[in-house]
Amino acid sequence: MKPLTTLAFILLCVACRGEAPDKSTGFDGAAAYGYAGVQVGFGPRVPGTPAAKAAGDWIVAEMRKRADQVVVQAFDYKDAKGKIVPMRNILARFRPELKDRILYVTHWDSRPTSTGRCCSPEAQTEVERNVPVPGANDGASGVGMFIALGDLLKKNKPAVGVDLLFTDGEDYGVFGPPPVDVLIGAQYFADHPPQADYHPLFGVLWDMIGDKDLRIPQEGNSINSAPEVVQRVWDLAAELGHSDVFVPENGGGIDDDHTPLLRAGYRIIDVIDLNYKPHHTPEDTMDKISAKSLGIVGDVAAALIARQ
Ligand SMILES: [Zn+2]
């Protein structure tokens, strides 16, 4: 390139940069990855275990440093075998005084059993089945993203109220059908909203969002029940240049934490990448997720709040 052409190129770039809207949200994917790593470091967050107690205490403490208010919903759950299991939902609220609110949901527990796609249940021994999953993607990726989002919301107060709900007991039992002992915290929250007239503008469940090979189609129940929220999220992701990750195709419907909330009348969708090989196996570890993927999803989550 000749010097003159180089100068013209630089000037042109400066000019176009001046005109282009700033799309960066400041979301820190590396920080989110670091928080997810701390969460996984406690060990499997199986409800009722010391690791779950420690991890839950840590989330409460971290969110108290960032949010305007932290509400802990502690309750005892009687499982299908009659065992009483302590559970905790953690709700971190930013600008709780505002009526217009956005609800984000992610689960913080991890699965007591490895029942993943690695092999058929018959091929698994009892010992293999009873290995709890580390849950780097399934249970920690969303937590990491939420804490990093907390960093951002503490720095830049949102113009709209934001509630970050960490649910417990999402993955405790079997999804069936019929589902037994799963989606426990989300159902509890649906039955016990934080205030009498609680009607968020919309909600998003963020689940398994850290896969290195991230690809998020639209979830079927979300398309059927809250299509305007699906549209909003995928349009914004495309605008931010993430349509290679947020692909506008129907990925099929699943039961997840959004289903009890949809039944309760919330306009909420599920953002999930279910196509994850180590899903519900002992291989769901930190090396399978990435700061880059968390950065992309965190960017969309942060922009959704900033645009409201
Ligand atoms: Zn799971």
Image (tube, helix red, strand yellow):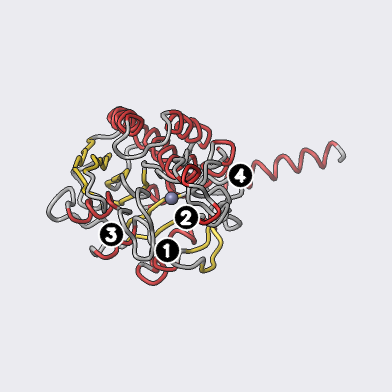
Question: Where on the picture, by quarter, is residue 3?
Answer: top right
Answer whether labels 4 and 3 touch (C-beta < 8 Å): no
Residue 104 versus residue 259 in the image, above or below: above
Q: Amino acid at mark 3?
A: Leu
Q: Amino acid at mark 1?
A: Ile
Q: CA distance from mark 1 to mark 4?
A: 42 Å
Question: Where on the picture, by quarter, is residue 110?
Answer: top left
Q: 137 or 9: which is nearer to us?
A: 137
Residue beneath the point at 31% across and 63% down: 267
SS of the residue under disc 2: strand
Q: 273 or 223: which is nearer to us?
A: 273
Query: Horizontal placement of 26 versus 184: left or right?
Result: right
Query: Horizontal placement of 179 versus 84: left or right?
Result: right
SS of the residue under disc 4: helix
Ranked by sequence position, the earlier of labels 1 and 2 is 1
Circle 4 sits on which residue?
A: 17
Tell me the mark number nearer the camera, choosing from 4 and 3. 3
| Residue 155 numbered mark, or none | none
Residue beneath the point at 53% across and 42% down: 284
Query: Horizontal placement of 67 versus 237: left or right?
Result: left
CA neighbours of label 2 inside 10 A, class few (<14), some (14 to 19), many (20+): many
Where's residue 42, x and y in %? 41, 29
Circle 1 sits on which residue?
A: 254
| Residue 272 numbered mark, or none | 2
Circle 3 sits on which residue?
A: 261
